[in-house]
Amino acid sequence: MEKKKNGNSKLRIAILHPDLGIGGAERLIVDAAIELVSHGHNVHIFTSHHDKNRCFEETLSGAFPVTVYGDFLPRHIFYRLHAVCAYLRCIFVALCVLFMWPSFDVILVDQVSAVIPVLKLKRSMKVVFYCHFPDLLLAKHTTLLRMIYRKPIDFLEERTTGMADLILVNSKFTASTFASTFKHLDVGGVRPSVLYPAVNVDQFGESHAYKMNFLSINRFERKKNIELAITSFSKLLTLEDNNATDVKLTIAGGYDKRLRENVEYLEELKFLAQKEGVADRVNFITSCSTSERNTLLSECLCLLYTPQDEHFGIVPLEAMAAYKPVIACNSGGPTETVKHEVTGFLCDPTPQGFSLAMGKFIQDPDLAQRMGECARQHVVESFSNKVFGQYLNQYIVDIVRGKLD
């Protein structure tokens, strides 16, 4: 640990992340690195995969180094054992950090807690774990074989999570789920602190339009419930007096042809659009760049955010930062970020609920602009990168100084 000129600590911080792609978890990690660098710390990201053609531009800027270990290890075995392979890849990264690099003051671990006992072998390092959501709740336990397979993994997740010096979660919703899921940790007094992800509001300028185009941005995964956007859009076109003759729907998001679910789900969504009779009005965009995504946000009428019980959801923040209202499900993280009837609408996750909210923007041409202005102000005040960075930096400094012990 070095001293900066102002007397504060200049820390050596490592960040471990499984796959540095372009999802919401990766966006948080990149933002964390940028903000910690802005506070004067030395930051180094370690990961098992970093595709320079499919990543956030900031990881190529040189503001912080990104080192890849273990990309030769399999991501799955015949499309099975994804969790085991992910654990092995991350543990390999942790071992490389442990034995090939000088000691760090703090290591921020993201998503995979199995690496924590490995890193704790070096007692001088503090370990902070960011839990987006308990993995055991995201995994399938639908068959006896899956239950047997997941049992030791679920046990390991709870025990290793509790070994972190500090646990952070992305919302109050996740914090309550954490307590009800990891009951042994809750009984033992292990409780996480909430650190909301943030959005870079400066990337969205004053220039924005409100074209007759609803926008959905999500990874092409079934849990994102993107079919709700298509069925709601189809329902919208059947509503009376909606004047939706020119309205369109754009579905964009992260797409990796290596992932079978991405490939299959995209085809399912295209088939659904054909079945609903709206294929000529629905545009699919895969793996758009940050600048392309920002353009889509700056020109849409409203964002449709379809996941149910989403533990946080960064896309609604990005939309609101771009002066756009959000229609989201009335559950999970969006209930903490979207102000109902102020910055958007929180609806039942049904085509009826979403389409009625969508119809309000068609009937009142100025509603999107009014709500968009409120949305931008809301994000600047509560969810900007600056606010996120201040809280994260304080957590990191306090854990090193022992104030959180």
Image (tube, rainbow, N blue to C red):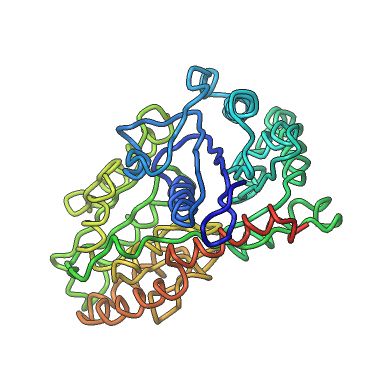
- Residue 227, image x and y in percent? 38, 51
The vertical placement of 17 against 242, above or below, is: above
Residue 186 in the image: state x and y as whole percent.
80, 57
Residue at x 67%, y 59% (from the top left corner): 398
Q: To which quarter of the image does residue 170 belong?
A: bottom right
Foreground residue among 130 and 58:
58
Residue farthest along the left direction in this orientation = 246
- Of residues 29 and 355, the one nearer the viewer is 29
Q: Residue lying farthest front?
A: 5
Q: Quadrant of the C terminus?
A: bottom right
* Residue beneath the point at 53% across and 35% down: 18
Viewer-side residue, 128 vs 342? 128
Q: Nearer the viewer, residue 150 or 193?
A: 193
- Residue 239 as seen in the image, left or right of residue 146: left
Picture quadrant of residue 26: top left
Q: Residue at x 62, y 66 (%)?
A: 172
Question: x%, y% of residue 8?
Answer: 58, 59
Write down the quadrant of residue 369 in the picture: bottom left
Q: Is residue 133 above or below residue 360?
A: above
Residue found at the very far right of the displayed protein: 188
x, y percentage for residue 59? Answer: 37, 40
Left or right of 25, for residue 83: right
Q: Is residue 332 left or right of residue 31?
A: right
